[in-house]
Image (cartoon, helix red, strand yellow):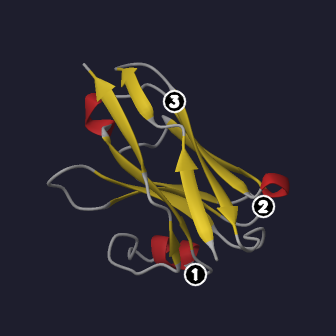
């Protein structure tokens, strides 16, 4: 059974940092693009970041550029999202996603409307002001 399991969410003050992780199990995703989305209550799903199989190509949503960094460790089947200079508006449930066409969908403007092969259950990040 394929699973993406996020962890590392929590409560942090504005201006602080947090790293969330996503561990894949059930199959290897070492050759698959992976990424992060988030969704706040009452808001639409928002693209956060994505990277290719070796981390050499990355994409970020406009709201997080310069503050968030996505990376991966294929030996651990894990993708990370390092979040810095956090703002209250970053409060959301953060979801990990894996999809062989993820970067194509992101680069063509379909990030928030496309469907994806695998999703995690999400981890809550709350930023207090």
Q: Earlier in the sequence, mark 1 or mark 3?
A: 3
Secondary structure of residue under mark 3: strand
Depth check: give the residue in front, 83 or 24: 24
- The location of residue 62, given as percent across then percent down, is 38, 50
Alpha carbon distance from label 1 to label 3: 28 Å
Secondary structure of residue under mark 2: loop
Q: Residue furthest right?
A: 75
Q: Disc number at residue 19?
A: none
Q: Earlier in the sequence, mark 2 or mark 1?
A: 2
- The location of residue 48, given as percent across then percent down, is 44, 53
Residue on which the image places disc 2: 54
Quarter of image, res 29:
bottom right
Disc 3 crowd, CA 10 A, few/some/many (<14, 14-19, 20+): some
Q: Does residue 85 lie above or below 19 as drawn?
A: above
Q: Earlier in the sequence, mark 3 or mark 2?
A: 3
Secondary structure of residue under mark 1: loop
Residue on which the image places disc 1: 101
Disc 2 crowd, CA 10 A, few/some/many (<14, 14-19, 20+): some
Q: Disc number at residue 18?
A: 3
- Please identify the quadrant where the C terminus is shown: top left
Q: Mark 1 and 3 residues: CB-CB less than 8 Å, in contact?
A: no
Q: Decide if residue 56 is on the left or right side of residue 102.
A: right
Q: Nearer the viewer, mark 3 or mark 2?
A: 3
Residue at x 46% of width, y 43% of height: 65
Disc 1 crowd, CA 10 A, few/some/many (<14, 14-19, 20+): some
Residue at x 40% of width, y 19% of height: 15
């Amino acid at each position: 059974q394929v699973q993406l399991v996020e962890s590392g969410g929590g409560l942090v003050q504005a201006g602080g940092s947090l790293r969330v992780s996503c561990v894949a199990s059930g199959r290897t995703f070492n050759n698959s693009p992976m990424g992060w989305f988030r969704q706040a209550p009452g808001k639409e799903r928002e693209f956060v970041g994505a990277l290719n199989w070796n981390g050499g190509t990355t994409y970020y949503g406009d709201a997080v550029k310069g503050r968030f960094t996505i990376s991966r460790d294929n030996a651990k089947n894990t993708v990370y999202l390092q979040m810095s200079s956090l703002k209250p508006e970053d409060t959301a449930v953060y979801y990990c996603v894996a999809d062989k066409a993820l970067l194509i969908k992101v680069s063509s403007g379909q990030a928030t409307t496309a469907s994806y092969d695998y999703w995690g259950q999400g981890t809550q990040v709350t930023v207090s002001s």
